[in-house]
């Protein structure tokens, strides 16, 4: 059962759009942290939530309101925007990500979604830390987590691109995006006025601002997604480098065609052999080495040993 689920998730991640992939990553973080807390509570603390997690793990995943602490752990600028502890917090953010992420993808392209998500999450983090540094009356906690800032960035981006686009809301009916965005902004102002979760509220505002800035710059011909995608592509190519290089050595085996000149029967066999090799190499190029079956891996290994 678990193997089947794992294969289904892998297939969805490979073939799904960017919204699906981001939701899967958030889900992996949510489930993984839940399991880790449970294991620590059983092995160490005998309590749940686990104090060991809060003391030894959380500080290396959550965003600190201190610039200095974050500077020593820069990866938290990214990990914090994929983390959720509460079930309703997680569900709420994933629903908003699904709704507005798909709209952004349909309007300006799937490759714009992840850059907006990341840029909005980073803007959320920097505004939160900046406000904390100036020690404003809006007291901010020691750390922050959640995709809210990134999701609000996608929300305002969708509303700025197509303000007249309508969504059907339960119990309300069709509502245009411009009014949904306005409601989101007003809710943040109300939260600030009531000093309710001020740290999270400033994070949300940072995401809203970045989503708006992205669309304004896009209209001016400055696509902020381009440099982000370049970096992401380089990271992806780095991890796929070995898988792409190894088959090229196999493909250039000069003896395959030579064997075909011995006899008519051998020629047909060699052509079939080479066609099968080409098909495997094409599959590796499109999906990576992990997509090969055990039979294909064995065939590739035997081909590489031929003289």
Image: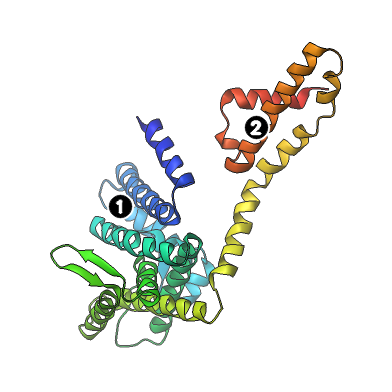
Residue 237 horizontal/vertical position (percent):
64, 52
The residue sitting at 29% across, 84% down in the picture is 138
Relative depth, front residue between 175 and 100: 175
Relative side of 69 to 156, left or right: right
Residue 55's quadrant in the figure?
bottom left
Residue 213 horizontal/vertical position (percent):
45, 80
Residue 171 horizontal/vertical position (percent):
13, 64
Q: Is residue 1 above or below residue 24?
A: above
Relative side of 247 to 297, left or right: right
Residue 100 horizontal/vertical position (percent):
34, 65
> Of helix, strand and loop, which one carries label 1?
loop
Q: Which residue is mark 1?
A: 50
Q: Is residue 80 visible?
A: no
Disc number lying in front (2 or 1): 2
Q: Which residue is mark 2?
A: 279
Within 10 angstroms of label 1, few (less than 14), some, or many (20 or more) residues? some
Relative depth, front residue between 201 and 158: 158
Of the two numbered discs 2 and 1 on the same chain, state the one appearing first in sequence: 1
**Quarter of the image where the C terminus is located:** top right
Q: Is residue 262 above or below residue 253?
A: above
Callout count: 2
Mark 2–mark 1 distance (CA, rounded to whole Å): 51 Å
**Quarter of the image where the N terminus is located:** top left
Within 10 angstroms of label 2, few (less than 14), some, or many (20 or more) residues? few
The residue sitting at 50% across, 75% down in the picture is 68
Q: Are marks 2 and 1 in contact (CB under 8 Å)?
A: no
């Amino acid at each position: 059962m678990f193997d089947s689920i794992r294969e289904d998730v892998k297939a969805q991640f490979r073939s799904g759009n960017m919204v699906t992939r981001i939701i899967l990553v958030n889900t992996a973080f949510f489930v993984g942290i839940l399991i880790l807390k449970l294991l620590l509570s059983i092995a160490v603390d005998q309590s749940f939530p686990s104090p060991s997690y809060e003391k030894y793990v959380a500080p290396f995943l959550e965003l600190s309101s201190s610039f200095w602490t974050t500077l020593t752990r820069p990866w938290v600028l990214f990990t914090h925007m994929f983390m959720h502890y509460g079930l309703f917090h997680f569900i709420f953010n994933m629903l908003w990500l699904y709704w507005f992420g798909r709209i952004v993808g349909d309007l300006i392209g799937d490759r714009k979604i992840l850059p907006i998500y990341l840029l909005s999450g980073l803007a959320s983090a920097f505004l939160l830390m900046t406000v904390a540094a100036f020690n404003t009356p809006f007291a901010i906690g020691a750390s922050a987590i959640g995709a809210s800032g990134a999701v609000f960035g996608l929300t305002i981006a969708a509303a700025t691109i197509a303000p007249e686009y309508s969504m059907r809301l339960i119990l309300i009916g069709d509502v245009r995006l411009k009014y949904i965005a306005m409601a989101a902004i007003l809710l943040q102002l109300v939260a600030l006025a009531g000093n309710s979760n001020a740290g999270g509220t400033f994070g949300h505002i940072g995401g809203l601002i970045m989503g708006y800035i992205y669309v304004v710059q896009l209209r001016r011909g400055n696509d902020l997604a381009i440099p982000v995608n370049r970096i992401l592509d380089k990271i992806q190519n780095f991890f796929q480098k070995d898988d792409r290089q190894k088959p090229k050595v196999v493909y250039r085996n000069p003896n395959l065609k030579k064997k075909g000149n011995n006899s008519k029967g051998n020629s047909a066999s060699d052509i079939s052999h080479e066609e099968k090799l080409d098909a495997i190499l094409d599959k590796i190029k499109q999906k990576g080495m992990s997509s090969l079956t055990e039979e294909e891996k064995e065939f590739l290994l035997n081909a590489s040993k031929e003289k």
